[in-house]
Image: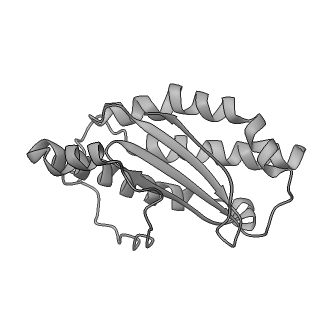
């Protein structure tokens, strides 16, 4: 079980560090940077994790400039977070996870997807569930305030852990 807790501890650190990279108080989100241009990493192809309900689709589609601005803001937060996350993956974490990514969960949430490099034992889900309060604390104390600082409201964060075959081991959403 000790190894499982270390994996979760690493998984908990990444979202905090990645989103903290998006919290510059000196420069508004999307403003030109004074630093030299960087080559952006091509985003992962994504599949929607769940179909939005009709009310959510309506609010995004008919939200006018506000809906588009909120969507663009969340996309920018996710892109910056993914770049930061990619740079923070340690060799030890790369041995455990084949893929770690952040995806937008419209209208104002994020999803952290962790794909294990190897199929994990059956007890892993129970170990992750036992750590659920730590994920909740991470959302409440760090992620939600970071997202709200970017002007997003009614924020949420989903943490999903998958086997290499794509089967979900454990997933939970906080907030929303």
List the single residue furthest toward the right: 1
Q: Quick one: quadrant of the C terminus?
A: top left
109 left or right of 16?
left
Name the image quarter holding residue 169. bottom right
2 left or right of 129?
right
Between 81 and 65, which is closer to the camera in this rendering?
Answer: 65
Identify which residue is drawn at 30% across, 53% down. Answer: 76
Residue 21: % across, % down? 43, 45
Between 73 and 65, which is closer to the camera in this rendering?
Answer: 65
Q: What is the total number of numbered labels drawn onto the structure image?
A: 0
Residue 95: % across, % down? 75, 67
Rendering colour mode: one colour
Name the image quarter holding residue 55. top left
Identify which residue is drawn at 19% across, 54% down. Answer: 32
List the single residue furthest toward the front: 54
Residue 39: % across, % down? 35, 72
57 left or right of 9?
left
Identify which residue is drawn at 75% across, 63% down. Answer: 96
Task: Give the vertical position of 159 relative to 149 (above or below).
Answer: below
Identify which residue is drawn at 90% across, 44% down. Answer: 1
Between 167 and 25, which is closer to the camera in this rendering?
Answer: 167
């Amino acid at each position: 079980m000790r190894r499982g807790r270390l994996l979760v501890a690493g998984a908990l650190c990444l979202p905090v560090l990645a989103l903290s990279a998006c919290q510059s108080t000196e420069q508004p989100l999307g403003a030109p940077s004074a630093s030299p241009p960087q080559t952006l990493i091509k985003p992962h192809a994504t599949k929607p994790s769940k179909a939005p309900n009709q009310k959510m689709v309506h609010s995004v589609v008919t939200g006018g400039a506000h809906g588009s601005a909120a969507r663009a803001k969340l996309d920018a937060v996710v892109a910056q977070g993914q770049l930061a996350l990619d740079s923070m993956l340690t060799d030890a974490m790369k041995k455990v996870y084949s893929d770690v990514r952040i995806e937008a969960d419209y209208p104002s949430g994020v999803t952290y997807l962790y794909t294990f490099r190897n199929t994990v034992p059956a007890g892993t889900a129970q170990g992750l569930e036992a750590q659920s309060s730590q994920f909740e604390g991470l959302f409440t104390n760090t992620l939600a305030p970071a997202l709200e600082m970017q002007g997003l409201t009614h924020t949420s964060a989903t943490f999903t852990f998958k086997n290499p075959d794509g089967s979900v081991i454990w997933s939970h959403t906080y907030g929303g």
